Image: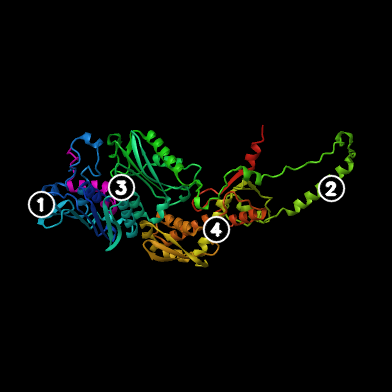
């Protein structure tokens, strides 16, 4: 029998490796920008056309490469960062495996122009599908210019499954921001389709964060700084009063690398315990500096997951540092003494004391009065008349209470979880008993199938969501113009999705006007939401759209309806009358789904009759 195992050609092997490292255009931007940083660049310019599908160009002023290095850079596992296996645990650079350029060249047309500072001329090499198509000596500036064209030209299946241009560009912005946040002393520039998106000058860390995410973040950040023998922590965390439910900016960086670490994220959330509402998230930008030998950055191809040797102690240090920063914040008001407005207090003197001294009052006492000589007269109780009056008042109170109990006819529901379809007519004529509100959070009522516990906030969210979604689709929502337009500022990622949301927002009664510099003015809002926080609600809509995508108009409408419904639904802790509870229950059972919220949360929990009876058996 002949042998069947053979070595793959280099071209196929590179394409397989490219599938691990280069997942989308944003991966190319990340790898090339990190290489520029490792080359000592102080200015990096990223040019993107068609969200990277047509062109990705990274221009840097680093130290450049020689002709030999430029050729070797595109070979697999060719690197200047490591020489032995021990070097993997002492990494202080971003790129080290030597797979990025080889993977990019395997699935795109790549051109590299580079020149070292002491060289008169530079070198240009062109590669397509891992094959060198041309080399020449050129005149260029010091540094490197990488041009990646026609990404995935030879892997049509990969190119076919790329997302829309808007989605891919948002991913590019995300990778660009993560790198720019770590190196504030390097100037970065991003251009998309000949439009400048970012122009970040060299600055300090706080200014870089504000330049990336907007000036509104400036007053929300608290400094964070601690130095220990195990780890040094630097960065910023948000004030407790500036948290949000969706779209929070959560960034961890370790030795100049962005990372995702759910365990450390829990340390941040635990630091805000009892300070922020449940379900809300704070913004934070936390930079860790640690001994490279105590971490492993080579456990994932994209290097966003890092394993720590001392996770528990670092967890405790992060939590303590954040709690200290929150304690030192100005969340607790302090007394400010203004000497100019101070009241003058006269100095004590004997003269002023006599002038201000009052006279002691005189008290007249009747010395002949003796309280013990008076004998009080106690009336004899008439127990018969008292009992008769109590019985009469009891019957009157009971009859009036029974007359005030409201009744509500249950609407017929098809395929209901809580009613039998066969006996729908019976239920339509049956009335609810009196509802009871438990801890201003749950509504307790009896149904034929048992005892129902209804979450009042979730129930109202479902009712409002169904009504809003129907009105949005039918374009029946009436908008009310604001007397004073409100200004809202978006991040660059949020700005990329706003054009796709404008039509759906107009259908929902939300009118926006672009002011420039990532700012919009809110001109109109749906009637019935006048008292809501328009800016926070709109930010929630945009965050949901970023999470769920905006490829389909129905998805956008659902995101808007859900955000509006949750913001206006009955909150926990609000007391409801019997009439309000009855109306809510009727509307709930008349909705499209009375069992779950649009997010899949349970609305009603049933306690069946058999289960209730079993609890009293001995």
Res. 320 image quadrant = top left
| Disc ID at residue 464 | 4
Residue at image x 41%, y 63%? 520
Which quadrant of the rendered structure holds the N terminus?
top left
Tell me which numbered mark, 2 or 4, is placed earlier along the sequence: 2
The residue under label 2 is 392
The quadrant where residue 618 appears: top right
Against 151, is 328 above or below?
above
The earlier-in-sequence mark between 2 and 3 is 3
Q: Position of residue 364 (x, y in %)?
A: 81, 41
Provide the secondary structure element on which disc 1 rests: loop
Q: Residue furthest front?
A: 351
- Front tag of 1 and 4: 1
Question: Secondary structure beneath disc 4?
Answer: helix
- Identify the secondary structure beneath mark 3: helix
Residues marked 1 and 4 touching at CB (< 8 Å) = no
Question: Which residue in the protein does label 1 denote?
Answer: 119
Residue bounds of the magenta highlight: 1-29
Residue 522 appears in the figure = yes
Left or right relative to 221: residue 276: right
Q: Residue, x 34% and y 59% (percent of image)?
A: 166
**Residue 236 vertical position relative to residue 113 in the rendered view, above or below:** above
Does the magenta-highlighted stretch encompass residue 44?
Answer: no
Label 2 sits on a secondary structure element that is helix
């Amino acid at each position: 029998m002949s042998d069947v195992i053979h070595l793959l050609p280099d071209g196929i092997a590179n394409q397989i490796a490219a599938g691990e490292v280069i997942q989308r255009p944003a991966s190319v931007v990340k790898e090339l920008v990190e290489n520029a940083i490792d080359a000592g660049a102080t200015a990096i310019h990223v040019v993107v056309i068609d969200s990277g599908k047509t062109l990705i160009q990274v221009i840097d002023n680093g130290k450049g490469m020689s002709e030999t290095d430029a050729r070797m850079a595109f070979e697999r596992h060719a690197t200047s960062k490591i020489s032995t296996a021990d070097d993997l645990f002492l990494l202080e650079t971003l790129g080290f495996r030597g797979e990025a350029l080889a993977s990019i060249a395997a699935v795109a047309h790549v051109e590299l122009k580079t020149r070292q500072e002491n060289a008169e001329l530079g070198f240009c090499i062109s590669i397509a599908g891992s094959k060198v198509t041309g080399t020449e000596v050129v005149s260029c500036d010091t540094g490197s210019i990488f041009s990646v064209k026609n990404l995935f030209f030879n892997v049509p299946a990969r190119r076919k499954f790329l997302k829309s241009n808007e989605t891919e560009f948002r991913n590019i912005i995300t990778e660009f921001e993560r790198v720019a946040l770590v190196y504030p002393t390097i100037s970065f520039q991003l251009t998309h389709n000949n439009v400048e998106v970012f122009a970040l000058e060299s600055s300090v860390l706080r200014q870089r964060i504000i330049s990336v995410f907007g000036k509104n973040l400036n007053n929300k950040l608290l400094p964070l700084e601690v130095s220990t023998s195990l780890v040094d922590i630097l960065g910023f965390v948000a004030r407790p009063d500036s948290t949000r439910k969706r779209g929070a900016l959560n960034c961890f960086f370790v030795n100049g690398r962005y990372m995702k670490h759910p365990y450390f994220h829990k340390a941040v959330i635990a630091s805000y315990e009892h300070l922020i509402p449940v379900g809300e998230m704070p913004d934070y930008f936390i930079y860790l500096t640690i001994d490279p030998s105590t971490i492993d950055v080579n456990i994932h191809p994209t290097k966003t997951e890092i394993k720590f040797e001392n996770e528990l102690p670092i967890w405790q240090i992060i939590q303590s540092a954040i709690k200290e920063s929150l304690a030192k914040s100005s969340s607790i008001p302090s007394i400010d003494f203004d000497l100019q407005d101070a009241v003058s207090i006269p100095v004590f003197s004997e003269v002023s004391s006599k002038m201000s001294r009052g006279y002691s009052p005189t008290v007249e006492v009747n010395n002949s009065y003796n309280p013990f000589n008076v004998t009080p007269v106690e009336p004899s109780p008439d127990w018969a008349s008292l009992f008769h009056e109590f019985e009469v008042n009891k019957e009157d109170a009971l009859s009036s209470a029974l007359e005030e109990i409201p009744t509500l006819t249950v609407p017929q529901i098809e395929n209901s979880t809580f009613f039998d379809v066969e006996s729908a007519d019976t239920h339509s004529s049956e009335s609810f008993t009196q509802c009871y509100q438990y801890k201003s959070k749950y509504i307790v009522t009896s149904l034929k199938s048992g005892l129902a516990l209804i979450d009042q906030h979730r129930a109202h969210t479902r009712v409002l969501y169904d009504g809003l979604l129907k009105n949005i689709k039918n374009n029946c929502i009436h908008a009310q113009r604001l007397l004073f337009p409100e200004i809202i500022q978006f991040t660059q990622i949020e700005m990329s999705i706003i054009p796709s949301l404008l039509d759906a927002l107009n259908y929902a009664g939300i009118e926006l006007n672009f002011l420039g510099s990532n700012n919009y003015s809110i001109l109109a809002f749906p009637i019935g939401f006048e008292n809501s926080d328009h800016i926070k609600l709109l930010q929630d809509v945009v965050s949901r759209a970023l999470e769920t995508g905006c490829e389909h108009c129905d998805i956008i409408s659902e995101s808007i309806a859900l955000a509006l419904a949750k913001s206006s639904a009955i909150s926990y802790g609000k007391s409801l009358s019997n009439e309000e509870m009855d109306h809510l229950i009727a509307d709930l059972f008349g909705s499209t789904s009375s069992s779950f919220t649009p997010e899949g949360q349970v609305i009603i929990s049933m306690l069946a009759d058999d289960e209730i009876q079993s609890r009293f058996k001995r």
